[in-house]
Image: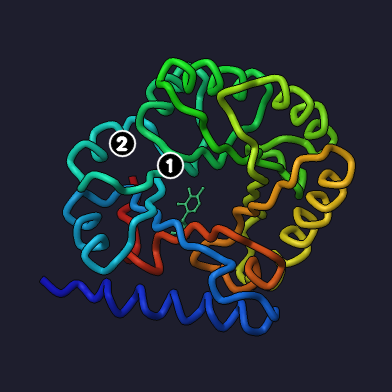
Amino acid sequence: MDSGLAERLQAVRERMESACARAGRDPGGARLVAVSKTHGPDRVREAVECGLTVFGESKVQEAQAKIPQCPGRLSWHLVGHLQRNKAAVAAQLFDYIHSVDSARLLEAVDRASAEAGKVMPVLLEVNVSGESSKFGLAPADVPALLARANELDNVEVRGLMTMPPFTEDPAEARPWFRRLRELRDAWRGETGFALDELSMGMTHDLEIAIEEGATWVRVGTALFGERERT
Ligand SMILES: *Cc1c(COP(=O)(O)O)cnc(C)c1O
């Protein structure tokens, strides 16, 4: 079967590398999460054959059905919103959570990860634009959450994630990506957390995000094609 995935992956890698080069960054400084939501295990297997190992899902329930049917030893990232009552399942399924957006959720993930016998790497999702339709912490609430994270043994806050408002022109996302990096730099100084990871940029705007410091880009459509509307 040739769905063109190998070519699309190559194109995404080239976009990532040229953005790194423009920004004077190490070409490996931005890594790819292949967002496989809505696509079945066959597409994941095909992506694995192309060399991908890090996959992103946005819904726990979908991931719960899919992951056991996929090759082992892949790394699964939860990139979508997580409800507290799904923390236990999420802690078992996932290796990384990009979307922690409250103290209660952080605590639930900590407890669930302890039960699953792991330390979960997490990112705090920040709503930098203040857009009311978006999930994410208000920037003002982040320092207190970092202080709380310091007291928890089974979550490790590695950095920050954001989803800017959608605009036709991806360049309009730049100020939001830049804002996340600037907030990170400030919190790094204030809290002692390194916050090395910045998860930002998707199919539409990954170059802009990388130019502004993204270390994880979450890409679905550019790899797997348009998703069916559900
Ligand atoms: C679906 C999704 C993506 C991937 O979006 P594309 O535009 O298809 O690349 C990235 N991040 C999150 C949180 C998503 O839900």
Q: Residue 176's spot in the image, x, y percent?
A: 75, 58
Does any atom of ligand 1 lie closer than 8 Å to the CB of label 1? yes
Height in image: 10 above or below 96?
below
Q: Secondary structure at mark 2?
A: helix
Q: Residue 212's spot in the image, x, y percent?
A: 71, 67
Kindly identify the residue that appears in the image at 58 percent across and 28 percent down: 155
Q: Residue 50's spot in the image, x, y percent?
A: 26, 69
Residue type at tag 2: Glu
Residue type at tag 1: Ser
Q: Secondary structure at mark 1?
A: loop
At label 1, counting other C-alpha atoms closer than 10 Å, the crowd grade (few under 14, some 14-19, many 20 or more) is some
Name the mark on residue 58: 1
Kindly identify the residue that appears in the image at 53 percent across and 68 percent down: 204
Q: Nearer the viewer, residue 56 or 130?
A: 56
Kindly identify the residue that appears in the image at 53 percent across and 15 percent down: 111
Looking at the picture, the colour scheme in use is rainbow
Which residue bears the numbered disc 2? 62
Height in image: 148 above or below 183?
above
